[in-house]
Amino acid sequence: MSSSNPKRIYLKRNSRNDLDDEYSRNQAGFPELEYGSPPRGTQVLNFSKESATEKEKKTDVIDEAMRRRRVDTFKEKISALEAKDKDQEAEIKRLEDLSNKLRRKNSIEKSKSKGPNLERELADEKAEISGLQRANWRLKDLLRDEEARAEKKTSEAKMLKAEMAEQGRHFQTLQGMMSTLNEATQSAIHEQKQLELESNKREAETNALTVAKRNLQRQLDEANRKLSVEVEKGKNLQAKSTAEIARTQVLREEKHKLGTELEDKKKLLDTLRRSFRALHAFANDEPLDS
């Protein structure tokens, strides 16, 4: 009897430690489940570059992957819990069989001398069985809580899907507004470029007119300078012309005077000629010409 006590105590402590470790792992493992997160390798939707149909398809693919992941995770957890439950039930059954065997093995006489030890062992066995049952209940409570949490996550996923659909519709509206705004922006940019071209053209024309004006001003200045020179020459010519006119007037007066003198001399010469002819006729007794 004394040789079996260390074995039962070892089994009892080992089973309790296993249950406590498993319970701790379950408590630590369940919160790590993030059913609302997309699976690894799944890309985040890029709503700014995809159409509504593509976004809806990708959203459905992600929802299906999330659902499959939740189902697989639940199946694995349930399988692990069921296996652990079976192991615990087998351990409980083994301990009960061991307890019954100890009861049958020990006679009434031995039980009288070793009664306190057997009672302690039975109390320990019962406490161990009670601990296993409580651990099993805790695991079942965890499973129920996890199922409720998964149901809540599923509901939240449905709400998220509805919100994503609503956001998709809003995005389509915004996309239409952005398209209209983009067209208006492109039109404004085109008009601005046209205005810049027109401004550059007018600026070039203004520069050309400025250059032409400067050239004309230089030509006008040159023409004014030449005109001043010509005016000065004209004044000189006018002075010379006035002098020439005065000289011509003097010459005309002298010519008139000479003409008058010549006429007088012609008249005198005619008189002298008539006198000579008269004298010649008188001398030759010729008749006098009329």
Image (cartoon, helix red, strand yellow):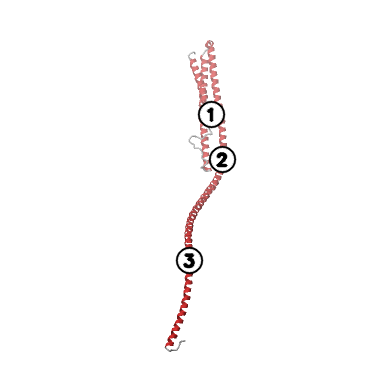
- Residue 167: give its label: 2
Location of mark 1 (residue): 31
Q: Residue drawn at (46%, 80%), measured in percent from left and top?
A: 268
- Residue 253 position (above or below residue 215): below
Q: Secondary structure at mark 2?
A: helix
Q: Residue drawn at (51%, 31%), measured in percent from left and top?
A: 73
Q: Residue 211 at x, y = what percent?
A: 48, 54
* Label 1 to label 3: alpha-carbon separation: 130 Å
Choose the circle earlier in sequence order: 1 or 3.
1
Q: Amino acid at mark 3?
A: Ala
Query: Is residue 28 visible to the viewer in this orientation of the structure?
Result: yes
Mark 3 Cα within 10 Å, few/some/many (few <14, many 20+)? few
Q: Residue 120 at x, y = what percent?
A: 54, 14
Q: Amino acid at mark 1?
A: Pro
Choose the circle earlier in sequence order: 2 or 1.
1
Q: Residue 270 at x, y = what percent?
A: 45, 81
